[in-house]
Image (cartoon, grey):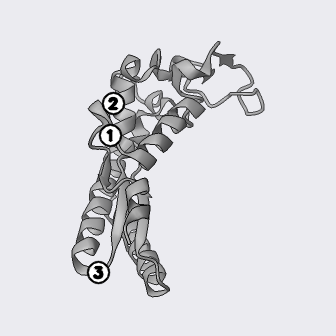
Amino acid sequence: MSQHVDIVIGNLTTFIHDIYKIGGRKFGFLNVPDLGCFPALRILQPKSDYCLRDASRLANMHNKALSNLLFKMQRQVKGFKFSLFDMNKSLRLRMQHPSNFGFKEGEEACCGTGKLRGVFSCGGKRIVKEYKLCGNPKDYIFWDSLHLTQNTYNQFANLIWNGGHMSDSLVVGPYNINKLFQIP
C-alpha cells in the first residue's frame, strides 16, 4: 500500500512542478474520501456495520501523504499557494450526523439493492437487474453504492468555494478557493 501511495504522490509532485514551470502558482486539491465506508465496499465485510479496512487504510495513507506534500511545497516553492478540501472529513461528518446537514440517511444508498443498497444495480442495466429507488434523493448522502447525491456534491462545492462553517470549519485550508483567487 505504501508503494502505491508513493507512486501516486510522486506522479502528483511531478505534475505540480510541471504546471509551476509554466506559471501555475495557485492550486486546488481535494483528498479522497474513506472509500472503505462506501456502501459497495461495506457490504464486502462480514458485518457491513464496519468500513472495509484495507480501502480505508489506503485512503488515509494517501490523504496524509498529500497533506504533507502540499505543506512541504508551500514552505519550499516560492509563490506556491493551495486550497485543500478535506472531503474525507466532510463526508465522514455527514455520514455520522446526517441530520446536522439536512440528510435523513447517512449510510444507505438511494438507489441499489441488498444491504445498504450496496449492490451496484441502479437502473437495472448491470449484472444484477433488481434495484430499489428512494423517494427523495435529497435525503441521502449516497446516490448509489459508489457515488454521492447532487445534494451532497452541492454542499461540498459550497465548502470548497466559501470555506467551512460550524462543524465543517476545518475542512478547507489554508485557503478556500474564493480566497485563493483573491491572492495577488
Callouts 1 and 2 close, C-beta under 8 Å: yes
Kind of residue at disc 3: Val
Depth check, mark 2 against mark 3: the one in front is: 3
How many marks are shown on the rendered structure? 3
Q: Is residue 61 left or right of residue 47?
A: left
Kind of residue at disc 1: Lys
Q: Secondary structure at mark 3?
A: loop
Q: Secondary structure at mark 1?
A: helix
**Which residue is rendered at x = 37% and y = 67% of the image?**
183
| 53 or 28: nearer the viewer | 28
The residue identified by callout 3 is 77
In which quadrant will I find the N terminus? bottom left
The residue identified by callout 2 is 93
In three-dimensional space, the C-alpha distance between marks 1 and 3, rounded to whole angstroms, equals: 27 Å
Callouts 1 and 3 close, C-beta under 8 Å: no
**Which residue is rendered at x = 41% and y = 81% of the image?**
17
| 54 or 170: nearer the viewer | 170
Q: Position of residue 138 (x, y in %)?
A: 57, 22
First in sequence, mark 1 or 3: give its number: 3
The local crowd at label 1, few if under 14, some if 14 to 19, many if 20 or more residues have their Cα within 10 Å, is some
Q: Position of residue 40 (x, y in %)?
A: 52, 32
Kind of residue at disc 2: Leu
| 39 or 24: nearer the viewer | 24
Name above or below for residue 95 compared with residue 173: above
First in sequence, mark 2 or 3: give its number: 3
Q: Is residue 48 visible?
A: yes
In three-dimensional space, the C-alpha distance between marks 2 and 3, rounded to whole angstroms, equals: 33 Å
Q: Quadrant of residue 133?
A: top right
The residue identified by callout 1 is 89
